[in-house]
Image: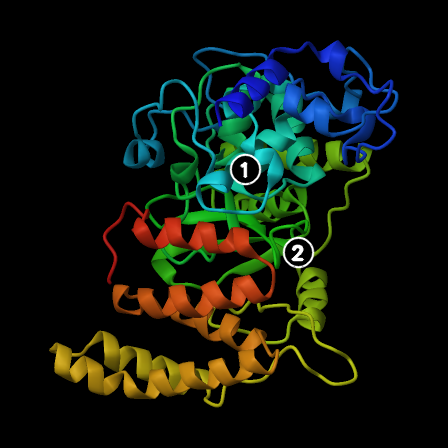
Amino acid sequence: MDSRLESSKRKRAKTDEEYSDEHSEHKPLCKYGENCYQKNSYHLQKFRHPQRNPVPVVKPEQELQVKEKSGESITICLMSSGSTGMKEQETSEANGTSSSVTAEHGIDNQESKEDDSELAHSPLDVKENIKHKFLVEMPDDFFQFWSFCQSICQQNTLGKLEIIELVGPFELLDQTQKKSKPKEKSDNLLTQWRFYYDPPEFQTVMVGDLSKGYHIGYFRDAPNEMPAFVGSNTESEGCVLTPLSDNLFSAVSQLLSVTVKKVDPFKKSQLTSLKKQLEDWANKNGILIEPQNQILKKRKKLMVAKTFYECGIVVPVDKKTKVGYREIPETSANIKKICKKIVESQNLSEQNKNSDSLQELVTYVQYANDESDYGMGLELGLDLLAFGGEVFHPTILHLLGVAYELLERKEFSVILKAHLNNRRRLATAKIGN
């Protein structure tokens, strides 16, 4: 054992040059190729990097440098570490480094075993940094929107309007570029802006009116896929997730169109100017501002079931055999009635009696799983999460845990467990249970 430890230490001590690609024909090719800027010795030893540039070259449209401006408030701004959502989540730093959620929770990711402190603070690999912490990869429009926000910060044309605030992965991006140490452990980052009804498939990146819990984020059908759409939810109004667009620019454009109709003439002028800036920037960079109804049409063609979230689920279904999904043998209205009776039970005995109908549905899910119809368990599990109620948490963990495992969406299980361990409402106004 000691000899292996010594060997490991010697490998870590070698320079990057000794891990060059001169004699690395048999190494697997790094998926990031010449665009990979990692300096971690483990990574360099394990993967080939043909034509790797010693100094990273960043294309103008990918420029993510932050030019700080003090004492100014902008329409689209970064949430500071002292803001409402952050205060609720603040924890002590873990010796200046962030724990690895992927390694902690057993996700099969070899690179998660690398030196996390190096990965966490490297501004050269921001995409991998965010993926490492949030377990999902951000799409191109996320970084493009960041660049747009920096451009309007520099122009300082927006006065003191505050429409939305960038949170979650945007905050980590900001910390990374400023080379500041993260103030959250990785597992807390998973729940930092996770609102009460949010499923693991949804990742918040913007918040609006926090008194109502309005937030915008990406919805993914699988953690290893790019987002299916950008959607929104208002926590105080329930679980429904509304698809808005396929990129942040289009989503914010819609938000501005709605907001313009509700403000005074002075703010209306400023918001109209902002909307034009956003759309001009998007057009210049080839980003499509698409109507919401087109997104809804595309989504309906793909989803196999609506769920209480109403944005639907997508699972692999064999076109010939139809194996992959089967309907729950109960209507959505009746499932809600079953859930309501369970939640309103006066005592444990009554609760157990009222749970018989739900347990029967869980049994049907088990039969479906045995016959590879994994979508049924995913649907029922998400319905229970969307309905709300701590009494359902064990059943949700079981149903979705199995579904995510069978569908090879294990990262969602990690997010789900973190959420249910710290599930609370983030809307600041008092709302019903």
Instruction: Indicate the position of residue 328 as horizontal and vertical percent values.
Output: 50, 85
Considering the image in quadrants, where does the C terminus appear?
bottom left
For residue 76, say whether it is visible: no
- Marks 1 and 2: which is nearer the front? 2
In the rendered image, residue 208, in percent from the top left (x then y), is placed at 44, 42
Residue type, numbered disc 2: Ala
**Residue 422 position in % (x across, y down):** 30, 48
Would you say residue 255 is visible in this rendering? yes
Q: Residues within 10 Å of mark 1 (few under 14, many from 20)?
A: some
Q: Is residue 4 above or below residue 207?
A: above
264 to the left or right of 319: left
Q: Nearer the viewer, residue 161 or 218?
A: 218
The answer to whether residue 130 is left or right of residue 293 is left
Q: Which residue is painted at 63% across and 40% down in the image?
A: 138
Coordinates of residue 67 in the picture (x, y in percent): 59, 12
Measure the C-alpha gap from mark 1 to mark 2: 32 Å
Q: Amino acid at mark 1?
A: Lys
Residue 228's label in the rendered image is 2
Disc nearer the start of the sequence (1/2): 2
Colour option used: rainbow
Q: How many marks?
A: 2
Q: Would you name the residue on which mark 1 appears?
A: 268
